[in-house]
Structure formats: structure tokens, C-alpha cells
Image: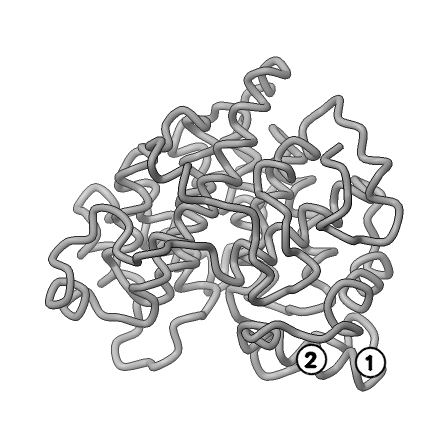
């Protein structure tokens, strides 16, 4: 089990203005990383180099977020609605209301873990049974975990508790641990913790003997040697699936540590390592965005992030990650979220 004795000391969160800057940085950073990494998803570094050289910016003509961004918006809105009172029943109801009981977009539920969850929910299964499918170990929870760290700034254990509730509908085991590591890391970064403390905060909330913890430790140990060393330490050679939570989360934290929290370097390191590049860059972007704030994100990258198109989740169309960031920082009025979600008509807070 995770050890309370080794839980690192995280600074107290800053004033409201600083938290807002970090919150916007975390969620905008997630969306930017997602859009930067999407073209390189499931590619090897050699394939990336052969096609683009080293990726140093957007390579898609019309960059946009994928399911990573839309599911992060989904979880952020859910969290803004319920806060620390979030329960598995709330999460399950939201999956039905906003996804399972509606027509799906062209992504049709997105990744394997989401598809398995939706199939189970539509069969009438409830959490945690709904998470009993073949892909409960995927990075589908990790990709939507950053809002929990934003909400629980400076409280990694609370961020980990809440994201596990969200994940109980769709994930189990290593899939939950990956989400907890990301949420805790973002929570520490939101309080201005240095990079080693951010990594230590992630490790503190997952079992010491888990695959996630072992991969995280390996990535952190070689991060100073750069992206090739991180990739070699984490990736299982010859394994075809790239959405393994222990692998993706470790690559993201390795990229973040290799860049010592620098936003541009963190996301580009993650992108150029390939594998599940949209998710690894999204997580690295959330960590670095929380560390450095919105101002660290290049303006042209930030400007490319539009409201969600609803390509994966039609119910999320029209929502922007910055709207969600505003809802999750202290002092925002979240009462509007208590009604039915109709994104194109809802006020922004």
C-alpha cells in the first residue's frame, strides 16, 4: 500500500489569483498537449522523425483536442456540480445523462475502456461492475484526472480520493492508480510544489508494489538523461497497445521531470516519444501548466484551442477547458450545473 510516512510536504495553495492562473494553465495545458500529440498517437519516435523531423509545434492543419479533452471537460463539469460530495452514483448518473443515453459522436465513446464501460452501462450494470471489462487498466481515467487536482489544489490525497470515485464506473486496479497519480501530481503542482515533490506526491497515493509506481520510479530515475532514456525505462518492447495506464502515466511524468516543469519542453518531450502521445502530452501539459501557469503556454498554441467540437461526446460541444478551470477554482458559482446539461445554451458561470 501507499505509505503515509513518505507523503511529501506540499506547500499551501497561493491566493485566488495565483490559483486561477494555475488552474487555467493546467486545463489549457491539457488541451494543448492533447492537440499537439494527436497526430503522433500510436507512432514510434523513428516514425515521427521520418515524417516531421522533431515535432516543435502543431503539425495538423486544424489542431484540436481529442477524447482526452472532451472527457476532461466531462469530469470537470461533474466535479463542479458535486464537489467533494461526489459519489459513484453521481458519476454513473452523469455517464447515463451525458453519454450512454445519448447518440454518440463519430468517436463512438473513444477508447477501449470507455467503450467497455458504455456497453456495460447500457446493459444495466452499475458501478463498480460497470468497470469489469477487458480494458480497466487503460489510461482513460488518467486523461481526465487533471480537473480533480485543480479542484483539490494543495491536497493530493483528496484529489486521489475524488478521482477514484470518478474512475469506479470505468476503471479498476492500475487504471485507477494512474488516475490517482495524475490527480495528486496536479494538486501538488497547483500549490507550487517543485518538480520532485510533484512526482513524489503522485507516488505517495498509489501502492508501492503497483505497476504504476514501479514505472513512475523508473521514469523519474532516468528523467535527467532525456526522452530516449525515459521511453526505454518504461515502454514494453513489442507490446502493441499504447494506452496502458502505467506506461502512459510514467511517460508523462518522465517528460515533465525531464523538462523540470517547463511547459514547452514537457509537452514536446511527451509528443516526440510517441506511443499514446495525445494522452501523455495532455498529462504532461496539465502538470507543467499547473506548475507554471497559463502564461507559460505559447499564445499561438493557446489560441488554437477552441471550444470542444463534441466529436467524441456531443454533450460536451461548446464547452471550453478554460470555462471548466474557472468553475473549479474557489469563489465560482457552480449552481448553473445543477440543471440538465445543454452546453450550447448554458451560461458560463
> Considering the numbered disc 1 on the image, is that residue within a helix, a strand or a loop?
loop
Residue 250 vertical position relative to residue 57 in the rendered view, above or below: below
Residue 132 image label: 2
Q: Quadrant of the C terminus?
A: top right
* Rendered image: mark on residue 115: none
Question: Left or right: where does residue 114 sit relative to residue 315?
Answer: left
Quarter of the image for the N terminus: give it: bottom right
In the rendered view, tell whether residue 238 sits above or below residue 105: below
Label 2 and label 1: CA atoms lie apart by: 10 Å
Give whichever of discs 2 and 1 has the lower sequence position: 1
Residue at the image position 80 percent from the left and 29 percent from the top: 333
Rendering colour mode: one colour
In the rendering, at what x and y percent does residue 277 appear? 35, 61
Relative to 117, 28 lies left or right? left
Residue 29: which quarter of the image? top left
Across and down, in percent, residue 100 comes to 75, 73
Judging from the image, what secondary structure is the residue with disc 2 in? loop
Number of other residues with Cα within 10 Å of mark 2, as a class: few under 14, some 14 to 19, many 20 or more: some
* Front position in the image: 56 or 303: 303
**Picture coordinates of residue 86 (x, y %)?**
81, 48
Answer above or below: position of 126 versus 34: below
Q: Residue furthest front?
A: 345
Q: Position of residue 68 (x, y in %)?
A: 52, 58
- Circle 2 or circle 1, nearest the eye: 1
Viewer-nearest residue: 302 or 67: 302
* Mark 2 vs 1: CB contact within 8 A: yes
* Crowd band around label 1 with a 10 angstrom C-alpha radius: few (<14), some (14–19), many (20+): some
Give the image quarter of residue 239.
bottom left
How many numbered marks does the figure carry? Answer: 2
Residue appearing at x 65%, y 40% in the figure: 324
Q: Residue at x 56, y 47 (%)?
A: 307
What residue does disc 1 label?
125
Amino acid at each position: 500500500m501507499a505509505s503515509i510516512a513518505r507523503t511529501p510536504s506540499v506547500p499551501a495553495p497561493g491566493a485566488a489569483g495565483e490559483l486561477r492562473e494555475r488552474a487555467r494553465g493546467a486545463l489549457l495545458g491539457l488541451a494543448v498537449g492533447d492537440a499537439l500529440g494527436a497526430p503522433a498517437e500510436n507512432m514510434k519516435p523513428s516514425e515521427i522523425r521520418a515524417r516531421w523531423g522533431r515535432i516543435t509545434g502543431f503539425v495538423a492543419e486544424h489542431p484540436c483536442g481529442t477524447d482526452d479533452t472532451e472527457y476532461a471537460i466531462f469530469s470537470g463539469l461533474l466535479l463542479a456540480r458535486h464537489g467533494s460530495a461526489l459519489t459513484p452514483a453521481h458519476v454513473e448518473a452523469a455517464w447515463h445523462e451525458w453519454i450512454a443515453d445519448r447518440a454518440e459522436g463519430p468517436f463512438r465513446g473513444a477508447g477501449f475502456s470507455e467503450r467497455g464501460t458504455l456497453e456495460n452501462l447500457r446493459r444495466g450494470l452499475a458501478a463498480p461492475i460497470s468497470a469489469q471489462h477487458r480494458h480497466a487498466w487503460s489510461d482513460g481515467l488518467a486523461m481526465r484526472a487533471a480537473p480533480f487536482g485543480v479542484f483539490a489544489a494543495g491536497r493530493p490525497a483528496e484529489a486521489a480520493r475524488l478521482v477514484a470515485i470518478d474512475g469506479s464506473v470505468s476503471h479498476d486496479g492500475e487504471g485507477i492508480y494512474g488516475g490517482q497519480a495524475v490527480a495528486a501530481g496536479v494538486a501538488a503542482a497547483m500549490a507550487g510544489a517543485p518538480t520532485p515533490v510533484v512526482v513524489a506526491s503522485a507516488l505517495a497515493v498509489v501502492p508501492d508494489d503497483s505497476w504504476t509506481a514501479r514505472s513512475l520510479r523508473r521514469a523519474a530515475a532516468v528523467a535527467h538523461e532525456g526522452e530516449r532514456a525515459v521511453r526505454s525505462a518504461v515502454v514494453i518492447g513489442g507490446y502493441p497497445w499504447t494506452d496502458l495506464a502505467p506506461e502512459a502515466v510514467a511517460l508523462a511524468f518522465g517528460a515533465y521531470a525531464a523538462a523540470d516543469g517547463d511547459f514547452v519542453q514537457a509537452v514536446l518531450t511527451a509528443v516526440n516519444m510517441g506511443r499514446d502521445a495525445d494522452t501523455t502530452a495532455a498529462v504532461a501539459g496539465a502538470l507543467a501548466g499547473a506548475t507554471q501557469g497559463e502564461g507559460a503556454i505559447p499564445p499561438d498554441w493557446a489560441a488554437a484551442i477552441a471550444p470542444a467540437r463534441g466529436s467524441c461526446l456531443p454533450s460536451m460541444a461548446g464547452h471550453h477547458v478554460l470555462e471548466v478551470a474557472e468553475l473549479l477554482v474557489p469563489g465560482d458559482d457552480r449552481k448553473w450545473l445543477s440543471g440538465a446539461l445543454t452546453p450550447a445554451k448554458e451560461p458560463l458561470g
